[in-house]
Amino acid sequence: MLEHPTAVFQQIVGWVVTRKHGCARQFRTPKEIAPAAPLTTGARKAVAAPPYLETGLPSARRQISYEPTGRHRIVDRIGQLLKFIDKSKVGIEVAPYHSPIVSRSDGFQSISLDIFDADELRRRAEADPEVPDANVKRIEEVDLQGSAGDIADLVSAKFGDKRFDYILSSHNFEHLPDPIRFLQGCQQVLADGGVLSLAVPDRRFCFDFYRPVTELSEWLDAFHEKRQRPTPGQVFRGTALRSNLNGGGAWGALLTPVPTPDENIEDAYAKWQSMQGGTDVEYTDAHCSAFTPASLELMLADLRFLGLIRLETIEISQPNVFEFYVHLRNVDAAPSSTDTTSFYRNRAEIMQRAAAEVGNRSPIAWLIHTAGTQVVSTGSRLITAGSRMISGK
């Protein structure tokens, strides 16, 4: 018998790593309101990451998710990411840092892409009190060193025309200054039928809560400008609209409390000023994009229809704690644009779901909405049946 979903969630989300350099942090549940005594660096690094980040045991990697109908279920995060990946296939993992999902030491035929080499990654991990020592040892050699946006050029320079069965990226996609270029690069290096699998944060359940979802126009501007780094405006928005829930930067889809906005607009403005005119030469990381499942589905569908990508969507999951999963397949050609009626009908349906996601910021709201719909439907059937009985039909 499964434990109550809330209990399971509280057990598993006490320690979650955002897989981005310098962004490892602990995310807490709302139950942990009382501040804990501070830990020394050594003590904090001795705390092991939860088993679902470390092992292949499905029972240790379960997390809460939701079906579109609002029924909760237990989801294996790693199982979701490896849905179209196995050890017989050859692929690329983007920015695995200290938590590789398709580790060579686990028998996967994978190569690693990262902006830093392995020595620098180990140095950063060892200096970060949030990264356990066991995770430092999991850092593997980097095969392709550079930006994920340059994936096609990096692969071509080292492997020529070699094509791969999959590309895996966890919590990197939202950081990319030019997502269209990355998607086009992925389709260049993926074999026909190859799969791009992504884990992406849902803005409703992380520090992006108060940010609007990214629109395709923003991606088109970035693509036209060939952006190599976040803009001053993106850095400002990410800082000025950042929020937290009881000190944590992410929380679960089961939780409905409204997060607290961070009080740092002055810092955001100062950083924006320092980035004007190219005076700030240091790369400033940011969430360049923010999504819900349907908002990202809409942009991917539009890009494919416009002929900017030929990757087709296999599936996009519902939120699993604070993230969701995207699987795209590389196909030979973009779809024919002749069937505009079908495209716009499907597009309208996606847009309606995207709008509903903005209003229903928690699956709890969706549960209530679903239950209400069922009550109305049942009531209508009872009224109809009663009318028939009265009329003798």
Image (cartoon, rainbow, N blue to C red):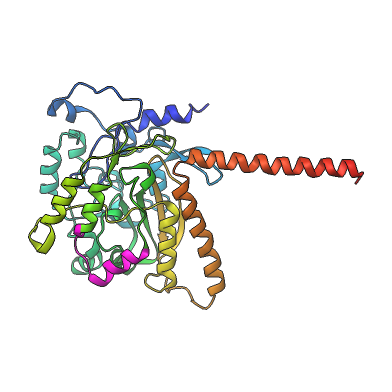
With 230 as the anchor, is 366 left or right in this view? right
**Residue drawn at (19%, 52%), measured in percent from left and top?**
285
With 72 as the anchor, is 45 left or right in this view? left
Image coordinates of residue 135 in percent, x first then y, are 21, 38
Residue lying farthest to the bottom in this orientation: 338
| Figure check: 45 above or below 102 | above
Q: For residue 88, what is the image quadrant? A: bottom left
Q: How many labels does the image show?
A: 0
Residue 160 seen in the figure: no
Image coordinates of residue 182 in percent, x first then y, are 29, 64
Check residue 118 for magenta coloring: no
**Residue drawn at (58%, 42%), measured in percent from left and top?**
370
| Figure check: 354 above or below 245 | below
| Figure check: 146 above or below 323 | below
Q: Which of 135 and 334 is in front in this view?
A: 334
Image coordinates of residue 314 in percent, x first then y, are 46, 59
Residue lying farthest to the front in this orientation: 266
Image coordinates of residue 355 in percent, x first then y, are 47, 54
Check residue 219 for magenta coloring: yes
Q: For residue 205, what is the image quadrant? A: top left
Q: Which of 189 and 314 is in front in this view?
A: 314
Q: Which of 264 and 174 is in front in this view?
A: 264
With 392 as the anchor, is 98 left or right in this view? left
Residue 326 seen in the figure: yes
Kindly report the secondary structure that dominates the magenta region of the rendered protein: helix
Magenta region: which residues? 216-232
Residue lying farthest to the right in this orientation: 392
| Figure check: 42 above or below 249 | above
